[in-house]
Image: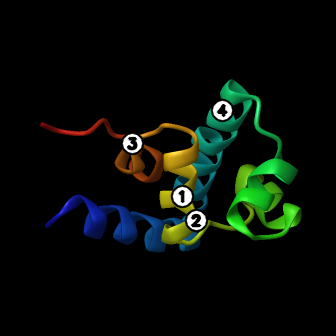
Amino acid sequence: MNRHTQSMGLLERSAGNDRLRRALAARLDRALKRTGISSARAANCLGVSEYDVQYWRRGITVPPLNACMRLATVLHLDIHWLCTGQPHAS
């Protein structure tokens, strides 16, 4: 199973699992704070509403994979880590 498929699978499971959703939210929130990017700025970069980003940061909803991929690029993060919390296995 490739990393893209693993990341997508975890995102789908996160939507229905409170613990996974909160863990993803914590990683996203920490990354945005570290880079100094606000929810409004992230939303503008992604073409979504600021409320969407705020919901993702709070763990209310889960971003779609395409948004996670763009966030990972903007935040200089590994998409696999952002989605799973696990480092990239070489």
Amino acid type indicated by mark 4: Arg
Left-right relation of 79 to 29: left
Q: To which residue does mark 4 refer?
A: 30
| Residue in the picture at 76% in, 29% down | 36
User: x, y percentage for residue 2?
Assistant: 17, 63
Q: To which residue does mark 1 refer?
A: 70
Tag 4 or tag 1, which sits nearer the N-term? 4
Q: Residue furthest top?
A: 34
User: x, y percentage for residue 27?
Assistant: 58, 40
Screen quadrant of the C terminus: top left
Q: To which residue does mark 3 refer?
A: 78
Closer to us: 12 or 34: 34
CA neighbours of label 1 inside 10 A, class few (<14), some (14 to 19), many (20+): some
Amino acid type indicated by mark 2: Ala
| Residue in the picture at 24% in, 59% down | 3
Q: To which residue does mark 2 refer?
A: 67
Tag 4 or tag 2, which sits nearer the N-term? 4
Amino acid type indicated by mark 1: Arg
Q: Do the residues labelled 2 and 1 touch (CB within 8 Å)?
A: yes
Closer to us: 52 or 35: 35
User: x, y percentage for residue 6?
Assistant: 28, 63
Q: Say which element carries label 3.
A: loop
Against 41, is 34 above or below?
above
Against 78, is 34 above or below?
above
Screen quadrant of the N terminus: bottom left
CA neighbours of label 4 inside 10 A, class few (<14), some (14 to 19), many (20+): few
> CA–CA distance between discs 1 and 4?
16 Å
